[in-house]
Every structure is written in C-alpha cells, then in structure tokens.
Amino acid sequence: MKAIGKPADGTLPVCRRLPGPACAPRARSGIVAVLLALLAPLAPLPVSAEEVLPGAGSVTASDFVAAAGAAAVSAEDHDWFDAARQRAVPVRLYLPAARDAEQTLPLIVFSHGIGGSRRGYSYLGAYWASQGYASLHLQHVGSDRSLWSGSIFSLVGRLQGAAREDEAIARVGDLRFALDQVLQHPQLGRLIDPRRIVGAGHSYGANTIMLALGARVERHGRVIDLAEPRLRAAILLSAPPFYGESDPARILAGINVPTLHVTATDDVIRIPGYYSGADDRIAVFEGISGPRKILAVFAGGSHSIFTDRAASGGVELNLQVKAATRELSLAFFRSVFGGGESALRDWPARYGGIVARFVAEGS
C-alpha cells in the first residue's frame, strides 16, 4: 500500500510508524491525499476561529460580520439531516440583508478543512454576503471540530479515520444534499440562481470540491466519479494533491470549469509523519486543464493563514492576505459570471507587494 502523504524524512512510509487506518488494507485508505492537510502546522491546535484556544490570535465570526457591515449581512444556521445516509449536515448560510425581490443571488458552497466547522472561514462568508452573494458553509460531521475532543493519545487515529475513503465520499454527499436542501427550500430556493453556483474549499475542503468538480480516482478497478454538475466554477485554497497517484493530470482531467487556486510560498503542512510543501499546491494547479485557471501565490504566509486564525503567518501579513483573497475571489466571480475582466486584471498590481506569483491561463 502507498502511504498517505510523504514520509517526513523521505524514507519510511507512514504506515510503518503509526497504527490505525493508515496501515489498513488499501480498500480502507483515504482517496484524498494529505487528507491530513488538513491541519494547521501547530496541530493539535484547532484550525477554525471559534475553535482556537484563548490567546492564540483568535477572532470570531461576529467580528467578520461586523467588519462586513452587520446591517448588510445576515447569518443563519440550519441543522439538516440526510435520512438516506443517516448523516447530519449542519450549515451556516450568509446572506445580504438587503435583497432585491426581483433578483436571485449567486451561491458559494464552502467546504472546511479537517477539524473545522460551519462557523469557520467567516471572513469570506460575511464578505461575500456583503457583496451580494449567498455563502453556504458546510459542516462535515465525520471530519469536523469533534475530532479535537477526547484523548490526545487517540488523536492520530481520529485524524486518520477522518481521512478515509468513505469520509471523503461522504463530504461530497454533504455538498450535494445541502445544495438540494437550499434549492428545494420554499423560501431559500427563490433567492438562489441555480445557474451561478460556485464550489469553494480549503485544504481537505479543496479536495472535496475537486471531487465534486469531477476529479476521478480509480479504486479496485472502479472509477469513483462524484461529479456535481451544478457547480460552475471553483475556488481552491491550499489544495493538496491526490497522493498515491502518479499522474495528477489524469485524475483532474474531468474538471472542466474555471478554477481559482490560492496558496502561499510557506503553505506547508507539517505534522508527525506527514509533509506537504507549497509545490504540491502548484502541482494541482498545473494538473487541471479547465477552460480557465488562475493561480495566486502569496509571499510567506502559512497553511492556516486562509482560516479565520488572525495571527497565522504574521499578524500584518495575515490581514493583508485575507483582504487580497477576498478581493481576488470577487474579481474571479465577476469574470466567471460576465461582470468584466478589469478587477481581475488590476488585482496583481494592487497586491504586488505580497504576491510572489500570479498566473492566468485561458479565457
């Protein structure tokens, strides 16, 4: 079997060091690579704003809602349950408070990294809502903040369990179910334009979105195809590759929508037994051949700078990267949905001081 992730010292595979699912037969290993990607470099510190320990540079969702203009944004939680899968799907939906009854809203569906929740990445959700978008933040109960509960001695096993193939598939099921719930809802469904739906995710969440976009992984002679055709574009933050696979382009060939890739030169995942460098994010970008793809690489940073953590990567840079990421995402949306190219074209010059690389391919 191929180890999950790269051995930290470049020699022994992970399954020779750690017990649990990583050493189980291949049928039980995760299909998404560095699914332990997962983690902030300081694991086991939690990775979402509401989960950060006091004094760790945390902020709250209400801080970002306030920054976006509390009067302009509303946030509502829904505790949905998928009876067919016997799985809870909690969500948080950010909406612009003032809405034109005659106009529908584009929808962004966001998938969190491992150990996160629907409350995380509020700096994006609140901002998008303030700009006229609906932002639906999923919580994946098999790989959410509950992983941080319990004995620290069994933490590795819990994390490995969250990276298993069945959980990776279940996360895409969460996305599909949540989309159904929104679009079929008697009130919410009237707000959303089903022709303008974007998938977005960070780390493990980016893997989830890639699977939903049509990334195809073969297991036991069968191709696992989880494509969700309602997604028209995607934002991939710190996207890990699909490890154990030698040809990323083959796996990602099914992705045929515009994609925005965002990372940083120090976007590195380091946890015991696992390593994933920033070059892995570039490999994902290069492996996708959709009609248009854009790459933004910030100078410095960290893997968790794209979460709600306020100090990761340095306080000043953290704020700058968040502001730049918000602005870039909005420019990308406008480009995809016919709002013009000027904002996207001007973005690199606006943030040249913190951007190490910017690539735009296709049209």
Image (cartoon, rainbow, N blue to C red):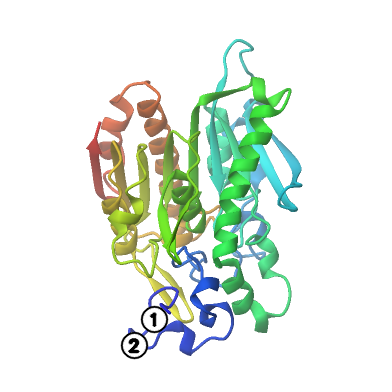
Helix, strand or loop at label 1? It is loop
Looking at the rendered structure, the secondary structure element under dot 2 is: loop
Quarter of the image for the C terminus: give it.
top left
Callout 2 crowding tier (Cα within 10 Å): few <14, some 14–19, many ≥20 = few
Q: Quadrant of residue 109?
A: top right
Residue 282 appearing in the image: no
The residue drawn where x is 44% and y is 50% is 210
Q: What is the residue that sits farthest to the front in this orientation?
A: 221
Work out how far the residue at label 2 is from the one at label 1, CA to CA, in angstroms.
Answer: 6 Å
Pointer 2 and pointer 1: residues touching (CB < 8 Å)? Answer: yes
Looking at numbered disc 2 in the image, what kind of residue is underneath it? Answer: Thr
| Position in image of residue 298 (x %, y %) | 33, 52
The answer to which of 39 and 337 lies nearer the viewer is 337
Frontmost residue, 67 versus 163 = 163
Up the image or down, 83 lies above or below 126; here it is below
Pick the residue in front: 295 or 42.
Answer: 295
Near-viewer residue (158 or 168): 168
Give left or right: position of 15 versus 286.
Answer: right
Residue 290 visible? The answer is yes
For disc 1, the marked residue is: 7
Q: How far across and how far down the image is residue 334, in percent? A: 39, 26
The residue sitting at 61% across, 65% down in the picture is 46
Kindly identify the residue that appears in the image at 29 percent across and 58 percent down. 283
Q: Quadrant of the N terminus?
A: bottom left
Residue 184, x across and y down, in percent = 68, 28
All told, the count of numbered labels is: 2
Say above or below: 165 vs 324.
Answer: below
Amino acid at the residue labelled 1: Pro
Compared to 135, does 140 lie above or below?
Answer: below
Residue hosting label 2: 11
